[in-house]
Image (cartoon, rainbow, N blue to C red):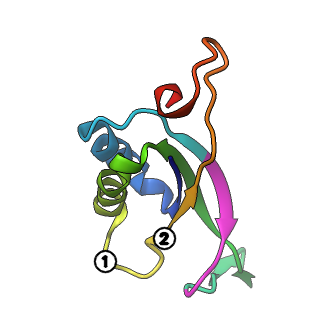
Amino acid sequence: MKLIVAIIQPHRLDAVRERLTGVDIAGLTVTEVRGYGRQKGHTEIYRGAEYQIAFRPKLKLEVAVPDARVDDALQAITEGSRTGKIGDGKIFVLDLEQALRVRTGETGDIAL
């Protein structure tokens, strides 16, 4: 099993969710986060004063998938989040040792 962690732009969430649902991947955790990479923030003017915004709002998605579904999930997230501009995000794939469904006690791929 793998845990896919993706950092994406907030306005791309619906597109990513639709793509994941389209390839029968259910279950997604979303967290609002802030950070920066190559974008390095930006400058804004508020009431005549200029100030630097160092951290950009992003969403962190976490999806647990069986090994056989990793490529499908990666493709769905990539296609749903890509705008072609800097700041589209990053995707990380981590090994997931075990999963357990609390309600039934099922473990492994069945628990996903």
Q: Earlier in the sequence, mark 1 or mark 2?
A: 1
**Residue annotated with mark 1:** 84
Give the tally of numbered discs: 2
Magenta highlight: main SS: strand
Q: Nearer the viewer, residue 6 or 48?
A: 6
Image quarter of residue 55 = bottom right
Q: Residue at x 57, y 20 (%)?
A: 106
Q: Residue at x 29, y 59 (%)?
A: 75
Q: Position of residue 40 (x, y in %)?
A: 63, 86
Please tell me the numbered disc located at residue 59: none
Give the secondary structure at mark 1.
loop
Q: Position of residue 48 (x, y in %)?
A: 71, 81
Tell me: residue 75, above or below residue 87: above
Q: Is residue 99 magenta?
A: no
Please tell me the numbered disc located at residue 89: 2
Q: Which residues are magenta?
A: 31-38
Q: Position of residue 39 (x, y in %)?
A: 55, 84
How many C-alpha atoms fall within 10 Å of the one at disc 1: few (<14), some, or many (≥20)?
A: few
On the question of residue 1 being in view, the answer is yes
Q: Amino acid at mark 2?
A: Gly
24 left or right of 101 in image: left
